[in-house]
Every structure is written in structure tokens, then in C-alpha cells.
């Protein structure tokens, strides 16, 4: 059995960061955690320093039962594992309820019980009366306390119930606390609250009862994070969240935004100081496990959270980054980024060059030339906003021109390529590509098949270059995006291709634009390999014909 209080959180038991990703977050459409996934999530949540991890509903869900059994192998540094379940059923006793027995069998030292606190739900959904509903709460809490468990009560639909019939809502809380529940968690189950009204209710409940209260907010109004922070400011000392705001419907309060606000805005050390710079890394790792692309615009931890596009911003940031950043992004493990688009000015390019390791300070001619070229290229469909690798190649080429230095030959030079699509009578489609390139002083011809023309072209190019460029074996095409640009109709449209490549150490993105999707892809593929060659200390230029 694990401990009942968080061991490694700075505020100890005086404030709880309670994560329910593995229970409430798993109810998000599209998320299906395996037991191995749940164990990996629990380890990451412990790394980031949450105090309590709600692992699921043992006894009711076989997968959750297995998780609690296997989670005994984890030596948590900060967190305490929590089992979730319901109060006893009406008309029986807690010790005879199989679901309650399942909570004990999990051997979790802390149990969260859910109970309805809205009289309408008690009478219509449970089909019982308030007296019996309170008895269900009281009996179950007392039974679990008698078995040595710590108990939190999730008062479901509390805010709606309190607005409709405050006396019933408070009777449910009182039944739980008098029976030994440590925290009465006020749940905005329907997610319909707004910060000011929610904070008023939290403050009113604390004033009337003196109970220790927690908060659990859904995001149906887009206010779950704001509501959670407002509840803490009103006196709640237990806040329930999910990683990246996962949850059913619009989701739950985002753990990373709530913690980010409590730590950086309210000065509350709710997780260990060493864990705060891990917020971005853990957020992205949890997104990978959930098989959901990270939200690039997520507060604090999103890749665009500290990204600046406007030239006016860049001019100010050049003087002091905090003029346009609400915090130093490194505090939460993130980075500031300057985006280069048609909106960019000289300050944006200089800052971006510094970010990419290209010193453009004191090079007004280069800055002027690059700004002009970027604007011209973007007018024809190019975009460097998400293609830093292609932009870096452009910057380095312009610096070489400014220095009157000779632009090094590319690691390979294209003579020609050809792609054939073969549609057989049986419906099978096979693409075949042939490339003729010059590399290491040799003319090389290579042919390969693929499941599409770009795949075949990439395979043929690799086949031709692999014997001469030893670093190529580490390079993988990890993502491929195609966008048909507006301004042209149908099959005559201009196509933009983004290619994301990776090796064992990093990822980089390149762009290609052309009226032909294969040529656009070729341009992006070539830039990807040229950029890798540059980082591998090979000659760098443009491999495009």
C-alpha cells in the first residue's frame, strides 16, 4: 500500500495538485490507454511533481484493476496513487457492495468517492431521496476510513446543485466530512460556470462550513483553467486537473496551465522547483502516449506559446524579451521563437538568425536582401514560418554572398529524376522512381519503388546517396504535409510541401513550393538532406537543379 500524503511536494499536505488524466482524461474521445500506457503516464506525472495521481476505477474496469496491481512496481518520488469509485448503492451496505470492495482490493491508500450533490440528480438519476443519498455517502466514507484509507469526496454537479438547492448540496458535503472525508471537492461537472460566480460559491461554502474544499472543473465554457485558479484564490486547497486538458466533451482544466499560473503568477510552489522546467517536456511526452498531436498554441508549454510573428514584436524583443513575453519561457522548459513571414522586418530576421546560429548583426545588406527575398517567396506561396531548416540555408547562402566567399558545392547534384505510377488490373498501385545524381565525383543512377510517388522518390534518392554519405542512414522522414494554396483552381493549384526529418538527436523542417506536387516534394527533400549535410560538417548549398 502506498502512502496517504504526497512525499515530495513543496507544500506537503497543505495544498494538493491532483491529476486525473488516467481516469477523467481517459474519457476524451480518441484516447485509449493500455495498461503499459497508464504506467508510463503515471511515471511522467510523478516526474513533474504532482501530489496525487488518480489511476482509474478498480473493480469496475478490468484494465484499471490490472493497472493498480502493476503500479505497485513504481517507486513514486512525489505522488500518491488514488483509486476512484462510487459510494455504496442504495439499499445495501458498504461492506457488501462489490464496487466498494474493489476499491479496497486495489490497495490504494487514498480513495476518491463520487457522489451526487444536486437534488435533481439524486431523485431522477439515483431514484432515491436526499436522506438515503447522504447515508450512502456517510456509510461508504466511514467504512473506507475504518479500513485505513484516506478519502476525498467528489461532489458531482455541485455548482448546479448549490444554485438549485444549496441545503441539499451542503448536506451531502457534511455527510462526507463528518464521516471522515478529508476534502470536499466541488465539481463543475457540466462545465457551465464562469470565474466570478464560481469563486463566489467557493468562498460562500468555505464560510458556511469551514470545510477543506477542492475544485474540479470541466472546460465547456472555455474557463476551466480560470475557474480552477479563481477557486484557489477563493480558498480551495486541492485542485484537480488533467494533462493537456484531456477529458470528455471540451475537456478538463489543463494541468500545465493551472500549475503554470499558480507557480509563476501566484508564487505558489505547488510542485518541486526542479520540476517546473520539465512542464513542456512532460506535456509533449504525454501527448505522444495519448497519440494526440501536441497543441502548439497551448498556454505555457505549446511550441507557439512564446512565438512572435509581427515585426513590431521583434523590434521590442531585441531590446528586452520580456517586453512581449509574460514570463521567461525557459522557466517552464519552453523557448521563445521568432517566426519569419511576410510580416517580418530586419529585427525579426536578426533575432531568427541568432536563434539558428547565424550572426546577422552588423550585416545590414544581408538583412535587407533576406527580408526582400522572404517577402517575394512568400508572395509565391513559400512559407518559412514552420521551416527553419530551409530558412537557415537561405540565410547562410546570403551571408556567403555578402562575404564574397564561394558558395560550396552541394553534397550531391541532380541530373534528372522520373516517377512512374503503375495501376494494375487488380487495382494494385505501385510507384517507381529513378534518379540520376552526381555525388562524390560519380554519376549514380538508382531506381526504387514506393507506396506513392514521393515515397518512391525518397527511396531512390537514398539508394543513390547512401554509399557516399554515411550519415544518411540516421535520417528519417518523420512527417509530410501538403497544402494546396489558394489563388489557383483545381489541379492547376500551387502546392506547398513541408517535410519534417529527424535523426537520433533532433528534428528539422524544410519547405518546397511548385505547381507540381512531386517537384515541391523534391525541393523539400533536397533541403532536408543539405541541411543535415551542413550539420554533419559537409559542404552546404542548395541541391535543387
Image (tube, rainbow, N blue to C red):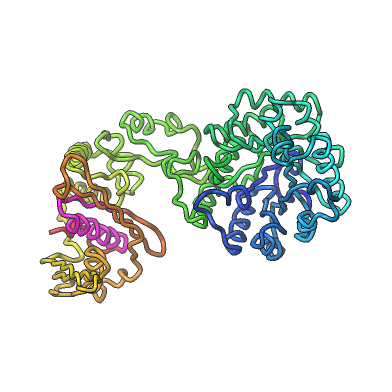
Q: Nearer the viewer, residue 116 or 106?
A: 116
Q: Nearer the viewer, residue 416 or 32?
A: 32
Occupied quadrant, residue 365: top left
Q: Report the number of numbered marks.
A: 0
Q: Is residue 412 magenta?
A: no
**Rendered position, 395 above or below 415:** above
Q: Residue at x 26, y 48 (%)?
A: 483
Q: Residue at x 67, y 30 (%)?
A: 159
**Rendered position, 166 above or below 478:** above
Q: Residue at x 84, y 41 (%)?
A: 135
Q: Which residues are magenta?
A: 510-536
Q: Is residue 348 visible?
A: yes
Q: Quadrant of the C terminus?
A: bottom left
Mainly helix, strand or loop, the magenta region? helix
Is residue 212 found left or right of 402 in the rendered image?
right
Residue 269 rendering spot, x and y as whole percentages: 66, 39
Amino acid at each position: 500500500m502506498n502512502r496517504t500524503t504526497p512525499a515530495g511536494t513543496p507544500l506537503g499536505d497543505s495544498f494538493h495538485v491532483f491529476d486525473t488524466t488516467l481516469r477523467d482524461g481517459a474519457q476524451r474521445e480518441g484516447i485509449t490507454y493500455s495498461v503499459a500506457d497508464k504506467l508510463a503516464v503515471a511515471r511522467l506525472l510523478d516526474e513533474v511533481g504532482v501530489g496525487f495521481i488518480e489511476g482509474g476505477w478498480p473493480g469496475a474496469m478490468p484494465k484499471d484493476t490490472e493497472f493498480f496491481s502493476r503500479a505497485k512496481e513504481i517507486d513514486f518520488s512525489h505522488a500518491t496513487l488514488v483509486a476512484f469509485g462510487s459510494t455504496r448503492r442504495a439499499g445495501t451496505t458498504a461492506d457488501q457492495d462489490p464496487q466498494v470492495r474493489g476499491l479496497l482490493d486495489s490497495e490504494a491508500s487514498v480513495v476518491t468517492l463520487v457522489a451526487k450533490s444536486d437534488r435533481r440528480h439524486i431523485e431522477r438519476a439515483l431514484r432515491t431521496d436526499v436522506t438515503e443519498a447522504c447515508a450512502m455517502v456517510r456509510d461508504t466514507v466511514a467504512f473506507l476510513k475504518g479500513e485505513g484509507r484516506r478519502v476525498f469526496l467528489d461532489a458531482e454537479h455541485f455548482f448546479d446543485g448549490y444554485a438549485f438547492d444549496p441545503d441539499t448540496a451542503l448536506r451531502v458535503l457534511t455527510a462526507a466530512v463528518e464521516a471522515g472525508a478529508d476534502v470536499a471537492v466541488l465539481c463543475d461537472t457540466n462545465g457551465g460556470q464562469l470565474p466570478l460566480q464560481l469563486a463566489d460559491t467557493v468562498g460562500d461554502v468555505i464560510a458556511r462550513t469551514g470545510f477543506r474544499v477542492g475544485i474540479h472543473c470541466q472546460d465547456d465554457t472555455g474557463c476551466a483553467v480560470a475557474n480552477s485558479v479563481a477557486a484557489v484564490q477563493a480558498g480551495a486547497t486541492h485542485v484537480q486537473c488533467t494533462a493537456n486538458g484531456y477529458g470528455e466533451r471540451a475537456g478538463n482544466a489543463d494541468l500545465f496551465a493551472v500549475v503554470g499560473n499558480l507557480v509563476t503568477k501566484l508564487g505558489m510552489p505547488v510542485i518541486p522547483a526542479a520540476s517546473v522546467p520539465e512542464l513542456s517536456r512532460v506535456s509533449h511526452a504525454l501527448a505522444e502516449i495519448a497519440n494526440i498531436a501536441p497543441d502548439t498554441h497551448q498556454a505555457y508549454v505549446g511550441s507557439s506559446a512564446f512565438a512572435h510573428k509581427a515585426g513590431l514584436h521583434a523590434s521590442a524583443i531585441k531590446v528586452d524579451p520580456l517586453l512581449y513575453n509574460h514570463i521567461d519561457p525557459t522557466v517552464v522548459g519552453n523557448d521563445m521563437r521568432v517566426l519569419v513571414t511576410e510580416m517580418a522586418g530586419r529585427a525579426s530576421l536578426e533575432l531568427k538568425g541568432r536563434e539558428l546560429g547565424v550572426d546577422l548583426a552588423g550585416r545590414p545588406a544581408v538583412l535587407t536582401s533576406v527580408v526582400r527575398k522572404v517577402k517575394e517567396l512568400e508572395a509565391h506561396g513559400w512559407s518559412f514560418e514552420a521551416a527553419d531548416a530551409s530558412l537557415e540555408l537561405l540565410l547562410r547562402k546570403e551571408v556567403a554572398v555578402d562575404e564574397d566567399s564561394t558558395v560550396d558545392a552541394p553534397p550531391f547534384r541532380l541530373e534528372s529524376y522520373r516517377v512512374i505510377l503503375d495501376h494494375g488490373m487488380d487495382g494494385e498501385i505501385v510507384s517507381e522512381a529513378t534518379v540520376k545524381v552526381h555525388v562524390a565525383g560519380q554519376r549514380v543512377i538508382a531506381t526504387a519503388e514506393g507506396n506513392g510517388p514521393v515515397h518512391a522518390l525518397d527511396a531512390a534518392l537514398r539508394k543513390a546517396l547512401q554509399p557516399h554519405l554515411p550519415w544518411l542512414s540516421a535520417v528519417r522522414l518523420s512527417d509530410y504535409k501538403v497544402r494546396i494554396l489558394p489563388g489557383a483552381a483545381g489541379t492547376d493549384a500551387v502546392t506547398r510541401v513541408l517535410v519534417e526529418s529527424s535523426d537520433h538527436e533532433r528534428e528539422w523542417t524544410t519547405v518546397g513550393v511548385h505547381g507540381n506536387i512531386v517537384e515541391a516534394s523534391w525541393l523539400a527533400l533536397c533541403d532536408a538532406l543539405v541541411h543535415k549535410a551542413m550539420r554533419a560538417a559537409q559542404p552546404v548549398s542548395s541541391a535543387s537543379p
